[in-house]
Amino acid sequence: METPGQRVRLRIAAVLIASAAALPAHADQCYAVDSSRGALSFEVKQAGAPFRGKFKRFGGEVCLLADKVTRIEVWLEPASVDAGLPEIDAALRDKDFFAVSQFPRAVYSSQSVEVRGNDLVSHGTLQMKDKRRNFDVPFSLRREGDQQVVSGTLTLNRLDYGVGTGEWSNTQWLANEVKLDFKVTLAAISR
Amino acid sequence: MAKWRNTTDTYGIIAQAMHWLVAAMVLVQLGLGLYAADLPVSLARLQWLSRHKSLGLAILALILLRFAWRAMNRPPALPAAMPSWQQRAARAMHWLLYALLVLAPLTGWLHASAAGLSVSWFGLFQVPDLISQDKELSALLKIAHRTCVALLSILLLGHAGAALWHAFVLRDGVLHRMLPWKPRGSA
């Protein structure tokens, strides 16, 4: 025969088990950003004409909660730059540009994500070389079939991050504004 | 009094002006290209090669204008005393020169396009790319461009040598057809 005390304890246990089971539905679902499932390209004007390239290695995480973006943490390895010309790629890895041996990764972390119309804006910080700056990234999150796709276009000033120092700080020949285009299909992370 | 158009025995002012303008531009262009080709990736390389590309496109445009003008203006005849094999050789030389004056800038333009280094003409307007970026093709086009330039240089030496030979050895007035003044004692 159960005592009233035991009954209360059982009930509490039942509630705890139920809420524990329900918990994952309310927690963030994080997805992997992986360069094998996306593309990141850049465009900068050289001598007044566009010059394009891409970065082949990047990654990180995007976390969602009920289709809302809660966290973005992404990185990029500038050593993976591919502008189509080996001698230019080598110069971009060198100290005047990305100084990859000293600064192997650039990292972006969001502090908050704001809904703006149909799209989103992430407020966060971008750490590149020895510079760390507040940086807003406008982007969109769309469902394509059963996949979540993150994409966006943004412009940053390379000189804010010391990319292209010395003679390359001449913005008449190499523009300060660098356009970045990204598109990545999120991959679920199993934990 | 010099004529604008070609006559039976001399090139007109327009043909002469275009010839010497292209000649001067090609000499500057060869100098720019040879100088910039061996520069390491640097601001100087970007600047000199950008000027080289813009000048090359200007030469290409002028050469095409020269073709159009030539089509409407028969060149003056070669001296009747010139053996027919020499006349044929001279004609072949000129067509080869014209071909290379088109091919050298054209392969340069194709190379710039394939390399992904598009051209803004002296910073004034964006020149379209002829083909899309392609690493392997870009390497081949670089060889093609250099080959055209090497052949063109040899031909230009032959062209200038032949002109001087006509002027100072044969003294048959062939060079003076392309000069604004005529040798003393000639009509």
Image: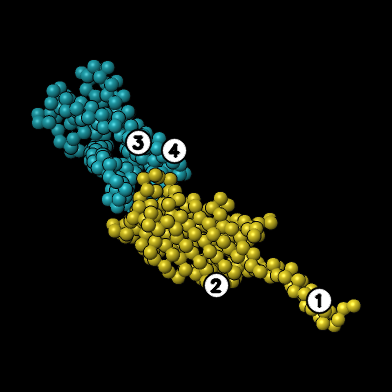
Chain colours: A yellow, B cyan
Give the mark, 4 or 3, whose residue is nearer the N terminus: 4
Q: Is residue B83 above or below residue A130?
A: above
Can you identify the residue that label 1 sits on? A10
- Looking at the image, is mark 4 or mark 1 nearer the viewer? 1
Can you identify the residue that label 4 sits on? B136
Image coordinates for residue B29, horizontal then vertical, percent: 26, 41
Judge by depth and name the residue closer to the eye, B16 or A80: A80
User: Distance between the Cα atoms at labels 4 and 3?
Assistant: 14 Å
Image coordinates for residue A107, horizontal then vertical, percent: 47, 62
Q: Furthest residue to the front? A: A1
Q: Residues within 10 Å of mark 3 (few under 14, many from 20)?
A: many
Q: Which subunit holds the residue at mark 2?
A: A
Judge by depth and name the residue closer to the eye, B92 or B87: B92
Judge by depth and name the residue closer to the eye, B129 or A76: A76
Q: Which subunit holds the residue at mark 1?
A: A
Residue type at mark 1 is: Leu
User: Distance between the Cα atoms at labels 4 and 1?
Assistant: 73 Å
Q: Residues within 10 Å of mark 1 (few under 14, many from 20)?
A: few
- Looking at the image, is mark 2 or mark 3 nearer the viewer? 2
Can you identify the residue that label 2 sits on? A112
Residue type at mark 2 is: Ser
Q: Which subunit holds the residue at mark 4?
A: B
Residue type at mark 3 is: His
Left or right, A152 with reference to A162: right
User: Distance between the Cα atoms at labels 2 and 3?
Assistant: 53 Å
Q: Which subunit holds the residue at mark 3?
A: B
Q: Are the residues under marks 2 and 1 on the same chain?
A: yes
Give the mark, 2 or 1, whose residue is nearer the N terminus: 1
SS for callout 3: helix
User: How many circles with numbers are drawn on the protein?
Assistant: 4
